[in-house]
Image (spheres, rainbow, N blue to C red):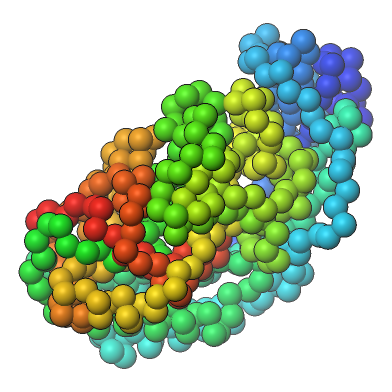
Amino acid sequence: MEKIKNYLSGKFDQYEIYSSQSNSKSISFESNSLKEISSKQSQGTAIRGIKNSDLTFASTSSTKADNFIKVIEELSGYPIFAPINFPELAKKDIQVQLYSSDTYEFPNDYLIDQIKLSRDKILKLFPDALCDSGFNLIESESKLENSNGLEIVTKQSYSGFYVSVQIINNKDMLNIYDGSSSSLIINKDQITIITEKIIKYLKLGQKIVDPPKSGCSVVFTPSGLLQSIISPLLVSFNGSNIAKNLSKLTNKENNKILDEKICIYDDPSIDYSPASKNYDDEGVPSQKFDLIKNGKFISGYYDLKSSKEAKRQTTGSAGRSINSQPTPTTSNIFMEKGKDKLDNIIKSIDDGILIDSLLGAGQGNELSGDFSANISLGYRIKNGKLIGRIKNTMLSGNAFDALSKINHLSLETENIFGTINLPYLCTNNVEISS
């Protein structure tokens, strides 16, 4: 590494070296049976060098310095304009917990037993179900250093558990998916919650009913809300899109754009969340910041390059891999809960839909907030009760319009994938068609 540093210091005005190594293993079941137990190791190094505001990026998985230097030399003839300064180290008093030495060490037999317990609970009630499920475990260590004296070593652990259930009955196909992730092992209680939620929706899905007419109230579960509305909304908050004037939010700070009940923030300081961080992947200290406060647009999420282009401050939101340059990324996204219990929200609706998942989510012009997709898992609400599953129904709308006026936000929230915490939300500002 010293040979590479000496080359970079002579070649560029400033430089940065990012290296990472990881161990990962996965256990997967397919159609109720064990399919695979696998493990792998990976490592790599990436550099960015800047001379006269021209940036060169190169990466390698090789450990041979001479070969990497040749690659850097060749790529330096094709720089991109990036008038940024790599940061100095800013020490943080409080460190977020990102690693547990126990996580990766859990034995395969234990993990397989937990998968089987979940599978057997489902098959006991639904013997024709086909369950895909599994664990993914990772431990990694990365090092970031630059010519301004910054040096940060980050060690992280990860565990992910998922269950996907499919029931085929003649021409009807019911698919339900759920899972979670953490820096700690996904424990028995968490797996039980995931399994029971799947069983609940499987029971509701046995009866198929006609969908209501367009214009009805639509309740989104946290999962449905993420797929349909929050995902396209976050595209508009991406600092690169704001800087390039591709987002509807360019120069709209402090303007009211959503219902005043909506508050959304990014918080990288949650202990043992896989999306948390003490520093972003450029070495900028991470901190909580508001995206939306009482319906007003407060800030996008920025890395060094996008913040410079947008003439804003970086939010410490750079994410990267060995093979790609840093880009703006979110950490833990939270939408503040409301005041209404979910049961009371359902009871207040004469005719409507509860949406949990979409098929083909992401279709439409995400930069404008548009979405359009078939409802994969949705239930009709009639006279304040869930009466059965709907089929052959499409949802469409615009994320900004959908949240411009909402009826209810629930007291209850759910953590999706271990990194996104959302309530249930009810609005009339979306379209359904069948």
- Residue 333 lies, with reference to residue 162, above or below; the image says above
- Residue 176 lies, with reference to residue 430, above or below; the image says below
Asked which quadrant contains residue 389, the reply is bottom left
Identify which residue, 249 or 307, lies in the foreground.
Answer: 249
Q: Which residue is drawn at 83% across and 60% down?
A: 94
Q: Is residue 1 visible?
A: no
Q: Position of residue 322 (x, y in %)?
A: 66, 38
Left or right? Give the position of 4 relative to 180: right
Identify which residue, 432 or 170, lies in the foreground.
Answer: 432
Left or right? Give the position of 84 relative to 292: right
Left or right? Give the position of 257 relative to 286: left
Q: Where is residue 424 in the image (x, y as percent from the top left)?
A: 38, 68
Q: Which residue is drawn at 15% across and 80% down?
A: 383
Q: How many labels does the image show?
A: 0
- Residue 238 lies, with reference to residue 156, above or below; the image says above
Q: Is residue 166 visible?
A: yes
Asked which quadrant contains residue 355, the reply is bottom left
Q: Where is residue 75 in the image (x, y as percent from the top left)?
A: 67, 15
Q: Which residue is drawn at 54% across and 40% down?
A: 254
Q: Where is residue 361 in the image (x, y as percent from the top left)?
A: 31, 50
Left or right? Give the position of 255 relative to 350: right
- Residue situated furthest bottom in the rendering: 124
Q: Quadrant of the N terminus?
A: top right
Identify which residue, 240 or 186, lies in the foreground.
Answer: 240
Q: Which residue is drawn at 84% across and 45% down?
A: 152
Q: Quadrant of the C terminus?
A: bottom left
